[in-house]
Image (cartoon, rainbow, N blue to C red):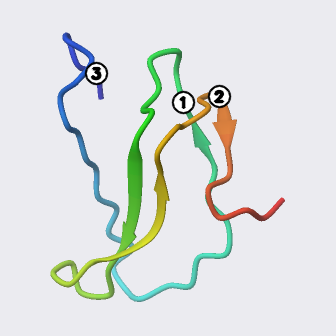
Amino acid sequence: MRSEQGAAPEWWQVDFGDVVELDRMVIHWEAANALVYEIQLSDDGTAWRTVRRQDHGPGGKINPCGHR
């Protein structure tokens, strides 16, 4: 997702079709990475809970869950 002005809020949603357990997530940011972002999870696509908030994103390849 790309913003022409660099400030438009964006989001994306992944539906696994069932409740799954995630133990790792890796994000590969392009050069125009998001400095501020949240990762939210939902079991039903309606009620969301924030599991990670980043206020000064470093860009590059990151693992927001903290696992290697």
Residue that numbered label 2 is attached to: 60
**Element type at marker 1?**
loop
Return the disc, 1 or 2, that comes first in the chain's sequence. Answer: 1
Return the disc, 3 or 1, that comes first in the chain's sequence. Answer: 3
- Residue 29 lies, in percent from the top left, at 54, 30
Residue that numbered label 1 is attached to: 29
Q: CA distance from mark 1 to mark 2?
A: 5 Å
Badge 2 density bin: few <14, some 14–19, many ≥20, Cα 10 Å: few
Q: CA distance from mark 2 to mark 3?
A: 16 Å
Quadrant of the rendering where the N terminus is positioned:
top left
**Towards the viewer: 16 or 56:** 56
Q: CA distance from mark 3 to mark 1?
A: 11 Å
Q: Are circles 3 and 1 on residues that touch, CB within 8 Å?
A: no
Position of residue 37 relative to residue 47, above or below, is above
**Element type at marker 2?**
loop
- Residue 32 lies, in percent from the top left, at 44, 17
The residue at 65%/28% (across/down) is 60
Identify the mark at residue 56; answer none if there is no mark.
none
Residue that numbered label 3 is attached to: 2
Q: Are circles 1 and 2 on residues that touch, CB within 8 Å?
A: yes
* Amino acid tagged 2: Gly
Q: Quadrant of residue 25?
A: bottom right
- Residue 41 lies, in percent from the top left, at 38, 74
* Amino acid tagged 3: Arg
Return the disc, 2 or 3, that comes first in the chain's sequence. Answer: 3
Q: Are circles 2 and 3 on residues that touch, CB within 8 Å?
A: no
**Taking 17 as reference, is 32 left or right?**
right
